[in-house]
Image (tube, coloured by chain):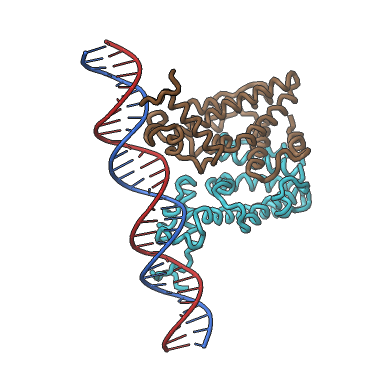
Chain colours: A cyan, B brown, C blue, D red
Amino acid sequence: MKSESKSYHHGDLRQALIGATEQILTERGLEGFSMREAARRAGVSPAAPAHHFGDARGLLTAVATGGFLDLQQALRAANAEGGDDRVARIRAQARAYIRFGVAHPARFDLMWRCEALNRADPAYLSASVGAFSLLHEAITGVGVLAEQLCDAAKPGIDVRAVAAWSLVHGFTTLARQGNFDPEMPGLMDGVLATLTV
Amino acid sequence: MKSESKSYHHGDLRQALIGATEQILTERGLEGFSMREAARRAGVSPAAPAHHFGDARGLLTAVATGGFLDLQQALRAANAEGGDDRVARIRAQARAYIRFGVAHPARFDLMWRCEALNRADPAYLSASVGAFSLLHEAITGVGVLAEQLCDAAKPGIDVRAVAAWSLVHGFTTLARQGNFDPEMPGLMDGVLATLTV
DNA sequence: ATTTCATTTTAACAGTGTTAAGATTTAACT
DNA sequence: AGTTAAATCTTAACACTGTTAAAATGAAAT
């Protein structure tokens, strides 16, 4: 409850570490991240984080999970923006996805840096599948459950959804890496016009 | 010349380190890589690589450059396979790109892990731009020079090429990360059918 | 044969993740 | 209330990392 006391116990170390990590990611990127640095910024000893997240992978996974939840929110806002027009909804989602990735490069990067994450983490799994499910639903009219995605060879995944996801994700990734400027006049809309929906 | 002598000088340390790194990448991925481990596998002291590559970034950049050259080769083979049919060439390139990424996941990953690389390296730059240029040429009939790409806001980049590249790259990336099975019947062809060329 | 230069080693430094043991605070129970 | 149990954090240590400076060695050039 007391937020400014310098007690032995931090009070909300878990959240503080997540915040510190996000700060580090935007400042220095993933390569500049270290567990010790996060602990340092939270004003706590190097070994403290282990109690809340197990290891570095656990902390990063928590941050990535938050990223997917934010992405979900952006996609939902796009849905609202698109209104009743199905194609408008899809286009709005695509723009939201791209802009999310370009606006939060380090965190977006982390979200797909699966070797640095614990993909078996239930929260991460549900958050990431939930995001894809929104895209899938916009295109096919029906969402996707985690089981369908994890079992990678099963039908239930719509080809159009995979194509749209690939296009949008690829554009975001390549732009994020500096291969072209996503806001170059006409480019994004031109690419999205390729979405055969 | 002498390949088996245990002389003080290695003889071809540069190439040996690149080979060791590729081996490590396929075995353990990028997170399992370390300069010291590469040196160890090459049978040399921890500090030896610095002389050839400067730092770890230099060594990884050399490996990524090799990856882009191999990718170029795969794309050229696809061109040959496609023969005179322009659309067939594009489709073949796309399949080659995807299969290259899925077949060499760790190296493909590294090729786009730009924060771990030295993107200013001329060899890397020319190799990576060369690969994109093949795709661009297949679609627009004309290649791209490095200057056009680096200066990210310039025209000369065809919207169709960016769209195609995004689709193929996104599909490869997402598949590589286990989001779906790229060889699932009908999926790859279905997605590539989206390529409006 | 001597010198010069490229290559590699040794030794050291600061920084990392992780673990085991102990210290401290909060919560739970009688 | 007083005692015990659990959660939280610290201290200390280990093995590892990238990088650097200085010395040692080999090969090439003069």
Using residue A110 as the reference point, say whether residue B159 is left or right of it.
right
Is residue A178 among the parts visible in the rendering? no
Place of residue B190 in the rendered image (x, y in percent of width and height, measured from the top left):
77, 37
Residue B8, by quadrant, is: top left
Q: Quadrant of the C terminus of chain B?
A: top right
Place of residue A87 in the rendered image (x, y in percent of width and height, measured from the top left):
75, 46
Query: What count of labels does the image hold?
Result: 0
Place of residue A159 in the rendered image (x, y in percent of width and height, measured from the top left):
76, 42
The front one of B139 and A181 is: B139
Give the residue at x 46% y 40%. B34
The front one of D30 and B72 is: D30
Give the residue at x 42% y 32%. B43
Residue B27, by quadrant, is: top right
Give the residue at x 54% y 55%. A63
Place of residue B157 in the rendered image (x, y in percent of width and height, measured from the top left):
61, 29
Q: Quadrant of the N terminus of chain B?
A: top left
Give the residue at x 44% y 67%. A10
